Amino acid sequence: MYRIILSALLCCATAAAVRAQQPGKGLTATLDCYYNYEHKKDKEGKLIRWHYIWDEQDSGGLSVWGHILDSLGVQRDTLHHAPDAASLQHTDIYIIIDPDNEKDAAAPNYMTAADAAAIYNWVKAGGILVILQNDGPNAEYERFNLLTEKFGIHFNGDLRNTVQGRNWEQGALRIPPKHEIFPNVQKVYIKEISTMTLKSPARSVYTDGKDVLMAVAKIGRGTVFAVGDPWFYNEYVDGKRLPPEYQNYAAAADLSAWLIRQAARKK
């Protein structure tokens, strides 16, 4: 028991030291609010923006991940229009989550060839792109593949890791030791995920059986990380829902640190 307590204290001290150093100071992480632009009615019947946004406190928000980035010194921003060279030049990390389909929005903002070219050129110049897609029924992927295929990543739009009720093991993924992105994680939870088909320059950083679930691509001076699920929204990182053996919060912290390292290399 003493060793367990000592180990926990050391981990907390290490985490505090990392936060104190703020390795992401001077970097900006920008969240897309164009391809994902969902609304719902509040208690008064007014339409409000929701789902995968920084300051959203409920289960579908990103406030917990936002706080992780804050603790590392990363400045957060939001892009409300289609990306172009002028807007992307002000960010280091660009995050696109769950692009809308017709179920999500009456008039979805689809990926276009011009948008894809702007993002590709930004990555090639040193940008760090994070893509958290979704399964086919819950996101648009046919047009969105215009972007991802530039990096060798094709989202299949299928449905992997369906979970019945609280049968958590159906969504369990075991991370191998010394993983290049998630070194402090052994087990995570991801449900209803789209698999990927890859070609160069993309490579798998997590394959389960024959299914590629996470990928990285290096383009010029930049980097792309992709997974077929929103993954880091509050419901599965705030520690309130999942059993304690699932380390989604630690995975969000590891990914954040890895993104900072990739961005720092271009400075």
Image (tube, rainbow, N blue to C red):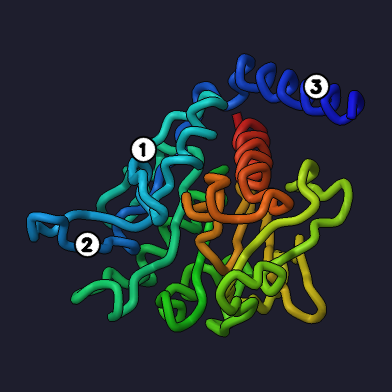
Q: Residues within 10 Å of mark 1 (few under 14, many from 20)?
A: some
Q: Secondary structure at mark 2?
A: strand
Task: Classify mark 3: residues with Cα within 10 Å, few (<14), some (14-19) or many (20+).
Answer: few
Q: Which of these two is toward me, 146 or 186?
A: 186
Real-space Cα separation, disc 1 to disc 3, in angstroms: 33 Å
Q: Mark 2 sits on what residue?
A: 39
Residue pointed to by mark 1: 77
Residue 128 in sight in this render: no
Question: Is 83 on the left-hand or right-hand side of 177?
Answer: left
Quarter that holds the C terminus = top right
Q: Amino acid at mark 2?
A: His
Q: Nearer the viewer, mark 1 or mark 3?
A: 3
Looking at the rendered structure, the kind of residue marked 1 is: Asp
Q: Amino acid at mark 3?
A: Leu
Mark 1: which secondary structure? strand
Q: Earlier in the sequence, mark 1 or mark 3?
A: 3
